[in-house]
Amino acid sequence: MLPDAVYYQVVFTLPSELSELAQFNRLVMSDLLFQSAWKGFRKTLRSEQDYAPAAMMVLHTWNQRLQPHWHVHALVPNAGPSREGFQWKQATAPELAENSDGFYLVDANSLRESFRRHAIAHLKRLRQNGKLKLEGKFAYFQDDAAWDRFCDELSQVDWVSQHREK
């Protein structure tokens, strides 16, 4: 634990449209979730705060009703080493931020968009490289047109990434 750092819980959730597919592709989809969450978070934090991020992440694949609900919880400090030089930087809210009450990590909308973009790109690569099991009820995704429609729909869905101070 870093002294004088505020910690945030950041949650990245796959949309329900992907949770069942993930159940049949556990290894590659858990990798997709971790990598997309980290890449989206790292890119957003570096862009907004200009320091190297850190996180401890835990995968959950079910909700409280034991239904598929794939998400990652990340514990994230609001500080880190500057990307330039040898400074320690803390996250600060932009002047026009809605939640500039002293607890700010990144813009939630930017984080969601970055996470979604990375996850969909990763999902497309998995299919292209033959790494997804598309059998049974998912066999129709072997058709390129059906797959493209599915990916287009995913890009229109609001993906969840939320963060709050812990």
Image (cartoon, rainbow, N blue to C red):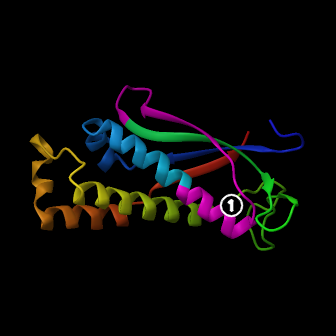
* Residue farthest to the bottom, as pictured: 96
Give x and y (percent) for residue 164: 68, 46
Give x and y (percent) for residue 154: 33, 61
Q: Is residue 160 above or below residue 58?
A: below
Q: Quadrant of the C terminus?
A: top right
Give x and y (percent) for residue 97: 74, 68
Identify the amino acid type marked 1: Val
Could you tell me which residue is drawn at 44 percent across and 65 percent down?
117
Tell me the element at label 1. Answer: loop
Packing grade of label 1 (10 A; few <14, some 14-19, many >=20) is: many
Q: Judge left or right: residue 121 versus residue 82.
A: left
- Taking the magenta stretch, the answer to whether it contains residue 52 is yes
Give x and y (percent) for residue 66: 37, 26
Q: Foreground residue, 133 or 140? A: 133
Q: Quadrant of residue 123?
A: bottom left
Q: Quadrant of the N terminus?
A: top right
> Which residue is under mark 1?
106
Could you tell me which residue is drawn at 44 percent across and 27 percent down?
64
Could you tell me which residue is drawn at 34 percent across and 43 percent down?
28
Could you tell me which residue is drawn at 64 percent across and 49 percent down?
163
Q: Foreground residue, 53 or 84? A: 84
Q: Quadrant of residue 101?
A: bottom right
Magenta span of residues: 39-68
Q: Judge left or right: residue 19 versus residue 73.
A: left
